[in-house]
Every structure is written in C-alpha cells, then in structure tokens.
Image (cartoon, helix red, strand yellow):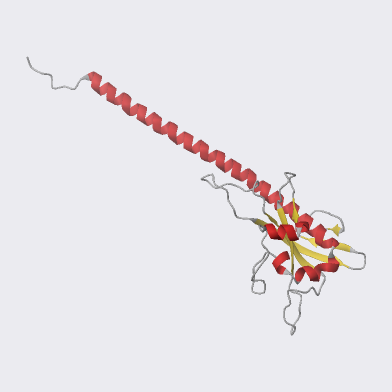
Amino acid sequence: MRKSLHPSPRGATLLVVVMLVLILLGLVGSLMVYAGGERVRAVSHARAGQRQSCAESGLQLARSYFGRNYATWNTFLSAPSSYDPVPSTFNPTPADPESPALLSAHPELFADVDGDGKMDVFLYIRDNEDEFDPLPTNWRRDNDQVAVVGAICISKTLRPRRNDGSQDATTLALEGLLSYNGGGGTNCSQGNAGTGAGNCN
C-alpha cells in the first residue's frame, strides 16, 4: 500500500487554529496593557490638576499671611533657612519643606488645604532685587515694600503618577510679587492670586 504524500487536513486545520488563538491572546494582552496604561495616565492627569490647585491655594494663603505680617518681613528675610526654600549663592542651606523640625518650629508656614489632617503646602517669602547701584544686593532686607511670596505643594496624596504607577515625587511651586501700601494698610498682589484678608488684585 502506498502512503499518501499529502499532509493530513486535520493537522493543517489544527495548526491554523493554534496560530489564531496565539494571535487573539496577543491582542487581548496588548489591550489589557493599553487599558492599564490609560488608567494610570488618567489618574496622573487628575492628580496633576489637583496639585496645581493645591499650589494655587497655597499661594493665596501666602499672600494673605505675609501681607498681614509686613512688620516682620525683615525678620523673615533674615532667616532664609526657615522662610526661603530656593537655593542660591546667598542661601546655601534653604528651608526644607519636608522637614519635621521646620514644621514643628514654624507650623504657621504650613497648611492643610484638602482637610485630610496632613500638611499640603509650605508658604515662603524671599526678597526681590531692590537695591540700586552702587549699593550691593542685600537679600535679607526689604527696601521697596515688595517681596516675592510663594507656596510649594508638598502633599503626598495629590502627587501624580508616572507611567509605571510609581509616584512622581517632584514638587510644584508657584510664586508672585506682593507689595505693601503702608498708608492704608492694604496689600496689593501681582500674579495668579484671589482676594484675601488685606489683599487686593
């Protein structure tokens, strides 16, 4: 009896079915990965907006707080390790908003903006360049009743997430100019701030 040289139809059909199953499994796996990534990106986008709102609320609080305390601006400016988190040549040891010691020493510089009992923003102040030649720049003293105030969102619950799902630990800071009008005791702020006690836009 001669053996057939043609492959079995059942074997060819089985091979095709296996290939189709593998292709479908690949497509399903790809869709699951894509859907998971979309979820992470959506959460990250939502939290990015929350962090922006957190910093904006903090900036309003900073303008209100430092506007009410103009008489002690020079005290604030003379202690940048507590009141200024921006590193510079004159401020080699800037304030650390994440420091428990700073929170304990100056709780008035921190605020909980979402009501969860945890500090969300750090408020700060630093001097603008207000000396004229030939006087040297003195960042520890105000001369023109104008200062730079700002806020850093330090909230861990409002941090956006990276594509791999881990938290993005970078902070967001917003700042603006605050000017003091001594005659009427009114403070006018420049930038993205709302109205507050003693402030006008």
| Front in this rendered view, residue 99 or 66 | 99
What residue is at 79 percent from the left and 64 percent from the top? 178
Q: Position of residue 98 (x, y in %)?
A: 66, 57
What residue is at 74 percent from the left and 55 percent from the top? 110
Which image quadrant is residue 39 in?
A: top right
Which image quadrant is residue 74 in?
A: bottom right
What residue is at 30 percent from the left and 25 percent from the top? 16
Q: Position of residue 46 (x, y in %)?
A: 64, 43
> In the picture provided, is 62 more to the left or to the right than 153?
right
> In the picture provided, is 57 more to the left or to the right than 69?
left
Q: Quadrant of the C terminus?
A: bottom right
**84 lies above or below 13:** below
What residue is at 76 percent from the left and 60 percent from the top? 106
Q: Position of residue 102 (x, y in %)?
A: 71, 60
Numbered disc total: 0
Which image quadrant is residue 43 in?
A: top right
